[in-house]
Amino acid sequence: MNLTRRHMMGGAAALATVPMMSPTAATAAAPPAGKQAPSFYRYKIGDIEITAISDGANNFALPDTFVANKTKADVNAALEKAFLPADKMTIPFSPVVINAGGKLIAIDSGNGPAAFVTSKGNVGQYQTNLAAAGIDPKNIDMVVISHFHGDHVNGLLNAEGQPLFPNAEIMASSTEWKFWMDDGEMSRAPAGRMADLFKNNRRIFEAGLKKKVTPFEWGKDIAPGLTAVAAPGHTPGHSAFIVSSGSDKIFIQSDTTNHPAVFVANPGFHLVFDQDAKMAEETRRKIYDMLVAEKMRVQGYHFPFPAQGNVAKDGEGYRYVPVSWSTSL
Amino acid sequence: MNLTRRHMMGGAAALATVPMMSPTAATAAAPPAGKQAPSFYRYKIGDIEITAISDGANNFALPDTFVANKTKADVNAALEKAFLPADKMTIPFSPVVINAGGKLIAIDSGNGPAAFVTSKGNVGQYQTNLAAAGIDPKNIDMVVISHFHGDHVNGLLNAEGQPLFPNAEIMASSTEWKFWMDDGEMSRAPAGRMADLFKNNRRIFEAGLKKKVTPFEWGKDIAPGLTAVAAPGHTPGHSAFIVSSGSDKIFIQSDTTNHPAVFVANPGFHLVFDQDAKMAEETRRKIYDMLVAEKMRVQGYHFPFPAQGNVAKDGEGYRYVPVSWSTSL
């Protein structure tokens, strides 16, 4: 083995000094593809088929106030631990479509076609990736909304304000529906983000959908194999879901946490978009303790695609272990 | 907030008792898609575009001897820690294609079309996923082989024994080439796996490719931006690679480790397929210490797709942090 040993390089220093040549554009035969793969991913829970459909990701400079009760340095420390760049946030969006007994149920709808244009394609990819997954929005029987924030509801309408799921029953938790449709709550909403949310929700659910929304209740089945779970705090009626079939199940957490690198690792961090941060943390810890105890997989709306993994207790927080991508169904 | 609190469920116990209904097949409108997404993934290293192309994954019952110097229980403990099922192994295969300055360079070739048939599509997906990624094998200028094991070289030929990359220059490390083409080494190879490997390599490189192989040397550039790195042990001439452009780089580790849950977490575990296990461990530790010190990303042939991440020191071993999937290029 002397021959091969002789060739071994001297570790870091030697590796760092490898010569670099510039690619010669003159010989270019194959242009770069310049395009990411369509981001959808399939898995089975018993007899139920789930497809995670990416809506893209939002990239922005980390604001000082991203976490209300922590400093920007605390957030950067969490990002660094996850090998993510400092001073930046990339928030992915991963709605799912469930095929249970031939019924197609979408949970949430992404940022919508208008956001696709303003973000130059970074977000609002839902309809494109849905098509890549072979799913026609006309065939969707039901759209279940986890909560009434723009990145979950704006994809219900096209750029002209018409329904994008023309044959679907739209479902929302009765608590969420009541809160956002309440004129008193709207009149008391502080100007800025909260007032804008009310306005946006009236645009979508009144002007666009003519209030044709069916309420669901926590703890009850919305459809065979799909159960609504109370997860309030992020919004008053914020809902999570359990999909179960046979002995298998998965927890669809919606926005129980935002990005796992920051909020699964640190459940005590309060995202500025949590309407009742104390209640959101209480919900988060209760749900995550349950996930750990039951070793239940979790699908997260704001997890990096395919947005699914397991969690373990880790000090005061939790360790997120992304699922191993399965190359066959 | 009394209303929402009233609806909150009692944690694990309550969640476990959700009622379950059976999907009613009679209402079936949408048949399950029954098919995974094409598994390819793009990213940039400076000006270089890399596409990870999955060749699928091999599932098998965990043999007693998967790790030569550890018990089956030790392997199961590593799997459990990674939330993977006990007594089973799923080994993914993720070759890459590099577009550097318009030159298309494939590193390794997967299990080949014959394996696609015998595995019922679980492995040998390379050509299908390559097509999904928009890459024609006729346009590949160079195929660089990391080492001469079947899951890396069998994809060089089609089922009829003809070259699958008809216009590509085939490259192999001079050490690897010399070892497998040496008649003395072949005559001394123990019957079984080693003798079969020699036979397979003669079939591919002599009968199929008529010995038209260009040797490369460790520490030298194979192409602009692509440098060969010595990584012997797994085989005598086993090679890793660094792709670099501008200030960015990635380490293409080939089989420096097998599955990260077992061998990145436990670099002292000796995979039964490591020809010189002691040297393979030495190579592994040297390379991983370098990756940690330089915070260099690593692409692994046997990592779960998209087979890329970062590593941190963790006790006696290393912690693998899968990359966050980017939904745009």
Image: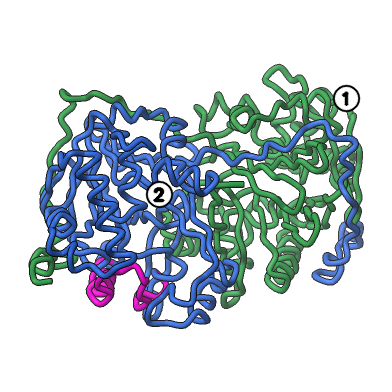
Chain colours: A green, B blue
Q: Residue at x 60, y 59 (%)?
A: A309
Question: Visible in this render: residue B54?
Answer: no
Q: Nearer the viewer, residue B192 or B273?
A: B192
Circle 1 Cα neighbour tier, 10 Å, few/some/many (<14 / 14–19 / ≥20) = few
Residue B94, numbered circle: 2
Q: Rounded to the nearest whole Å, what is the CA distance between mark 2 and mark 1? A: 49 Å
**A180 horizontally vs A26: left or right:** right
Q: Nearer the viewer, residue A309 or B328?
A: A309
**B111 horizontally vs B14: left or right:** left
Residue wearing tag 1? A210
The chain containing the residue under callout 1 comes to A
The chain containing the residue under callout 2 comes to B
Span colored in magenta: B264-287
How many numbered dots are placed on residues in this image?
2
Quarter of the rendering containing residue B218: bottom left
Q: Residue at x 69, y 42 (%)?
A: A96
Q: Is residue B271 magenta?
A: yes
Marks 2, 1: nearer the viewer: 2
Q: Is residue A208 magenta?
A: no
Circle 2 Cα neighbour tier, 10 Å, few/some/many (<14 / 14–19 / ≥20) = many
Q: Quadrant of the C terminus of chain B?
A: top left
Q: Nearer the viewer, residue A101 or A250?
A: A101
A289 to B256, vertically: above or below: below
Residue B7, horizontal then vertical, whole percent: 90, 59
Residue B317, horizontal then vertical, whole percent: 38, 76
Where disc 2 sits, the SS reads loop
Quarter of the rendering containing residue A115: top right
- Amino acid beneath label 2: Ser
Q: Are marks 2 and 1 on the same chain?
A: no
- Amino acid beneath label 1: Lys
